[in-house]
Amino acid sequence: MTSPLTPDPSAKEGTPATPGGALPRHVAIIMDGNNRWARARGLSGVRGHHAGVEAVRATIRRAAERGIETLTLFAFSSENWKRPRAEVSALMELFLLALKREVSKLHANGIRLSVIGDLSGFSDSIQKHIVRAEEKTRDNTRLHLVIAANYGGHWDLTRAARRLAERVAAGEMDPAAIDEAAFAGELSLAGVAPVDLCIRTSGEQRISNFVLWELAYAELHFTPRLWPDFDADALDLALDDFQRRQRRFGMTDEQIEAQHGA
């Protein structure tokens, strides 16, 4: 059986699969390769990020059509501030523009938007538009779109630990009551189903400090496509790959088969 850490050789790019299992409830995507896509065309990195916006639109549309419950996109990591100042500035402008132009479309299509990460790092204008977008789409149920921006898994875990420590120090919580459920309840994705499938584009095979807790039992799918080339068909291939896998969660093959046959 193919390891979830490597692409399934039977699921080659451009070759549709014959799915059999259930679809993932929660799909997370590390959108990688915008700069390489641009360089290959003699363009600036910023042009690559603009091209990636259409891939975001196509992926959201397809996820909604396929009935995915939650789609989490890694848009900007806490480490991305180290990039050239001009690129970071352009990314912030693109983020603000998307918040202004795309939210009404999301709302019209029944899509809820949430943004996770250390939002204090953004300008007042971006923070204001994030709040407006979340409030506007809060009651939508067709798809929950989560954008991870200025986000890092270490930051998320550290913040959760700090919050629990503060509750204990205030006498609101007994340390013995801290269990997995209590810890998960303090994370950015509290109340959201764990990630079932994590996709990374551009051929890189790492998770880069992305939703570490929620990826504990996720299936991983790596594609060589650069993010601007990712489309509905590419998402379908990843979903088909997921449906062919057997998820054990610590159990044996025999236990899984007996469970499915019950």
Image (cartoon, helix red, strand yellow):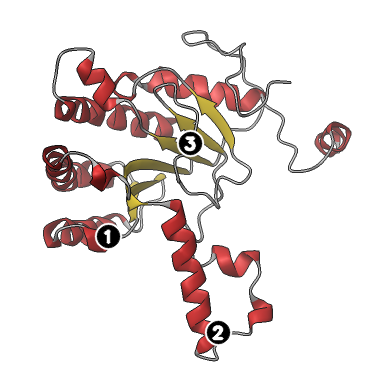
**Looking at the image, residue 143 lies above or below residue 136:** above
Residue that label 3 marks: 67
Residue pictured at 27% horizontal, 26% vertical: 34
The N terminus is located in which quarter?
Answer: top right
Residue type, numbered disc 3: Gly
Residue pictured at 17% horizontal, 39% vertical: 84
Across and down, in percent, residue 8 comes to 61, 18
Q: Secondary structure at mark 1?
A: helix
Across and down, in percent, residue 64 comes to 41, 35
Residue at far bottom of view: 171
Which quadrant of the structure image shows residue 257? top right
Q: Secondary structure at mark 2?
A: helix
**Looking at the image, residue 109 lies above or below residue 199:** below
How many residues crowd around disc 1 within 10 Å: few (fewer than 14), some, or many (20 or more)?
some
Foreground mark, 1 or 3, reads: 1
Residue type, numbered disc 1: Leu
The first of marks 1 and 2 along the sequence is: 1
Foreground mark, 2 or 3, reads: 2
22 and 210: which is toward the camera: 210
